[in-house]
């Protein structure tokens, strides 16, 4: 007898622009997911910002210096998506 484990994965329909950015990033939450946590980290993995998706649009990263950043999106404490961002 064969057992098949099904993994349910969230597919997030989010958009971030502008990327690269000179000022801030805007995240558009197209699916309206409200239980997602977002962590903005630098290239070394140091967390700079943390926010919850509570609205269709969120601005972030305004205080970041030019460089490479990553936005980790987590649903139920599981990493779902990592987005590379560039601030110039």
Image (tube, rainbow, N blue to C red):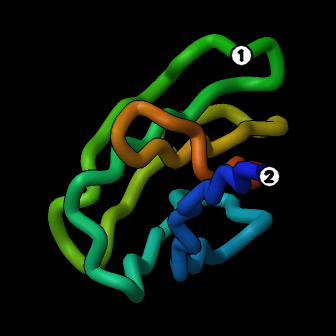
Q: Name the foreground residue: 28 vs 19.
A: 28
Where residue 22 sits: x, y (%)? 68, 59
Q: Which residue is mark 1?
A: 45
- In the rendering, at what x and y percent does residue 74 appear? 47, 43
Residue drawn at the location 40% of the way across and 47% of the way down: 75
Nearer to me, 17 or 5: 5
Q: Nearer the viewer, residue 28 or 17?
A: 28
- Relative to the observer, which residue lies in front, 18 or 40? 40
Q: Residues within 10 Å of mark 1 (few under 14, many from 20)?
A: few
Residue 72 x, y percent position in the rendering: 59, 41
The kind of secondary structure element at disc 1 is: loop
In this view, the residue farthest toward the left is 54
- Relative to 11, 67 lies left or right: right
Whether residue 63 is visible to the viewer of this picture, yes or no, is yes
- Residue at x-position 57% and y-position 73%: 11
Measured in 3D between alpha carbons, the distance from the residue under mark 2 to the one under mark 1, in whole angstroms, is 40 Å
Name the residue: 37% across, 61% down: 59
Residue 51 picture location, percent across and down: 30, 41
Numbered tag placed on residue 2 in the rendering? 2
């Amino acid at each position: 007898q064969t057992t098949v484990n099904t993994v349910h994965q969230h597919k997030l329909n989010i958009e971030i622009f502008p990327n690269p950015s000179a000022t801030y990033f805007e995240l558009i939450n197209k699916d309206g997911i409200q239980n997602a946590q977002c962590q903005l980290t630098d290239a070394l993995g140091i967390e700079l910002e943390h926010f919850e998706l509570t609205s269709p649009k969120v601005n972030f990263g305004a205080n970041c210096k030019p460089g490479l950043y990553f936005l980790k999106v987590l649903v139920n404490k599981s990493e779902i998506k990592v987005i590379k961002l560039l601030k110039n």
